[in-house]
Image: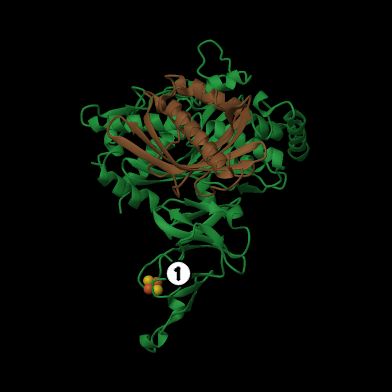
Amino acid sequence: MLANGKLVIESSAESRFLVNREVFVSEDILKLEREKIFNRSWIYAGHSSEISKPGDFRSRLAAGRPIIFCRDTQGEVRVHINSCRHRGAMVCREREGNTRGFYCFYHGWTFNNDGTLRSVPGADSYGDKFDKSLLGLVPVPRLESYRDFWFVNFDINARPLIDDLAGAKEYIDIIVEQSPSGQMEIISGTQEYEIKANWKLLVENSVDDYHLLSTHITWMNYMSHSGVNMKRNKGALLPMQGRGKDLGNGHLVIDNPNYRGRPVAAWISIYGEDAKADIANMRAELAARLGEDRARRVADTNRNLAIFPNLVLNDGSSVTVRNFWPVAPDRIKVTAWCLGPIEETQEQRARRLHAFLTFYGPGSFATPDDVAALESAQAGYASWQEVTHNDLSRGMGKALPDQLDTDEEHIRVFWRRWSELMETQS
Amino acid sequence: MSALETSVKLRHEIEDFFFHEAELLDDWALDDWLNLLTEDASYFVPPTDKPRASHLDTLFIIADDILRLRERVLRLKDPACHVEYPPSRTRRFISNVRVNVDGDFIDARANFIVYRNRRGGDIRMFTGEYRNRLVRINGELKILERRAILDVEELGALGMVSFIL
Ligand code: FES
Ligand SMILES: [Fe+2]
C-alpha cells in the first residue's frame, strides 16, 4: 500500500498533485505515522519562559507521552517522562508549579527535580543489588533548543535540531526580533481543545491562504467595519498577496506583506488613536536596533510557519504557538498559547491579547470556522472509497519564486516530506 | 419591607432577568440580547487553566469589549459564520442565583448548564458559573460585565466556544 507510493501522486507533466483520502481515515496509517514521523521528528516540548526559575515545571504531552518539562535546582532544563520507575503512576499531576522534586503518591517513591530517585519507603526489602542511581525518572532520548523553543526527539539518532530546522530558523529569528532583548515569553492562559479531524488537515489549514476569503469573510467584515482597509484589487483573493516557501525538511512558511495590523509594529484603527504614538515608538526602536530593512521585515510582514510535523507559529495579528497531537485518525488535541516580547508594557500586552482573540482560538472570529471546515472535510472522507483523492495542484507549473501564499506548493512541501518519511524502511 | 423581603425581592428580579436573558440567547434573538447590555459592556470567557485571571495579562477564550461584541453578534447572524450555520440549538438551565449589592452595582452569580445540539447527534454540555455585574439605567437592569466561567479543565471535546455562552 505505502511501498507503491500511491498515497501521494505527483505528476508535473499533468500539473496534478493528489493525496489519497485514505490517509485521513486509516488507523493503520496513523500507527505508521506515530512510528515513522512522531517517533523520529523533533517535537515541541515548551518554551524557556514557562520554566524561568529553578524548580519550575509544566506537565504535558509530547508525541502522546506524558512529560515533565522543568528546570532543576541547578538551573538546567530537563524533560522527564512522567511515569514512576516503580509501577508507572504519573509522578506529577499538577499542570504547573515550582518544586524541589516529584512525589509518586502510589507507593511513595520520591524523585528530585533533576530526575534522580531520592527515596523509597521500605528500601531494605529490595536486597543489596537495589541501586537507586539506576531508577531515576527516564529522560527523553534527545532534548535540544533553538532560541528558547525546546524540542524533544524520541529517536536517539535523530539529526541535531539546529540542522533539522534548516530554513525555519530564519523565521523563528524574525519572530524573536520583535523583542528588544531577543526574549519572548509564553503569556499565561492556555487554549486546549479538540478538533474532529485528521491532524494533517490542521497543518494544511494553518498555512493555507486560499481559504481566507470564503472561510473567513465574517472576520474580514469585522476588520473593514472597524476601519481597516481590506480592499482587494480586481480578481485578487486577498488585500495583499504573499509567497509560499519550502524551508527544507518538511518545514514551510507563508510569508506575507501585512495588511491586518501587528502589535509590533503596524498600527490599525482597532488599536485606537491612543496607541498610535506607542506603536510608532516601537517601530522606531526596531529601526534603530535592526536597521530600516530588517525593521520592515519584522514589522511589515506576517508569517505562518509550520515546523514539521506538529508545531505552528503564526506571527500575524499576534503570535500564536500551536502544538497538536492526533489522538485518533479523526481527532486532534490542540494546545495553543500566545507569545509576546517580555518587555511589553501592560497596555501593549493587553493590545496583543485583544488582537490575538479576534483571529485565533476557540472563541475568535476565525479559528472556529477553520475547525468547521476541517470537520466538514473529515466528515466528507467517510466516502474515501468513492471520492478517492484531494487535489492540491494550485500553482503547479509555475516557477518556485512565483508560488503565492494562495497556491498550494508549500502544502505540497509538507506532503512530499510526509510520504518520504512514511516510505522509509525499518 | 424587611431586609429579608428586600433581598428576596431583588433575587427574584435577578432570576427573572437571567431567565429572560437565557431565553433570548436560546432563541438566537441576539439583537434583543444586546439591548440588555450597557453601552460599555464587556463579555468574558476566561481560559480553562486560569479561570480567575484578568484578560489584560492572560490569554482568554473570549474577551470582548462592546465594539467586538456587537461585531460578534453580526457575525453570528451571518450565514457565512460557518461554525454556527445552521445555528446550533442551545438550551440553558440557570440556578443557584446569588446576589450581592455593591454600591451602584449588583453582582449576580448563577450556575449554568448549556446544552449545544448540532446535526448528527452532536450534543455538547457546557457547565459553569455566570458572574455578571449589573447596573440600573433608568430603572432597568443592564449588564455591564458578563463573565462565563467554564468548569472544564480544558475545552477538549467541547471544541469551540462559537455561540454566546
Ligand atoms: S508506582 Fe510510583 S511508587 Fe509505586
Ligand atoms: Fe483559517
- Name, please, the residue furthest toward the left: A386
Is label 1 in a helix, a strand or a loop?
Answer: loop
**Amino acid type of the residue that numbered disc 1 sits on in the rendered structure:** Leu
Residue drawn at the location 45% of the way across and 22% of the way down: B29
Q: Which chain is brown?
A: B
Please tell me which residue lies in front, A101 or B160: B160
Q: Is mark 1 within 8 Å of ligand 1?
A: no
Please tell me which residue lies in front, A36 or A196: A196
Residue drawn at the location 44% of the way across and 47% of the way down: B152
* Quadrant observed for ligand 1 in the rendered image: bottom left
Total labels drawn = 1
Please say if A161 is above or below B131.
Answer: below
Tell me the quarter of the image containing the N terminus of chain A: top left
Residue under label 1, please give it. A137
Please say if B20 is above or below A30.
Answer: above
Q: Position of residue A21 (x, y in %)?
A: 28, 33
Q: Colour of chain A?
A: green
Q: Position of residue B82 (x, y in %)?
A: 41, 25
Residue A241 at least partly seen: no
Please say if A93 is above or below A199.
Answer: below
Give the quadrant of residue A349. Answer: top right
Tell me the quarter of the image containing the C terminus of chain A: bottom left
Give the quadrant of residue A104. Answer: bottom left
Residue A51 horizontal side relative to residue A311, left or right: right
**Chain identifier of the residue bearing label 1 in the image:** A
Residue A390 horizontal side relative to residue B130, left or right: left
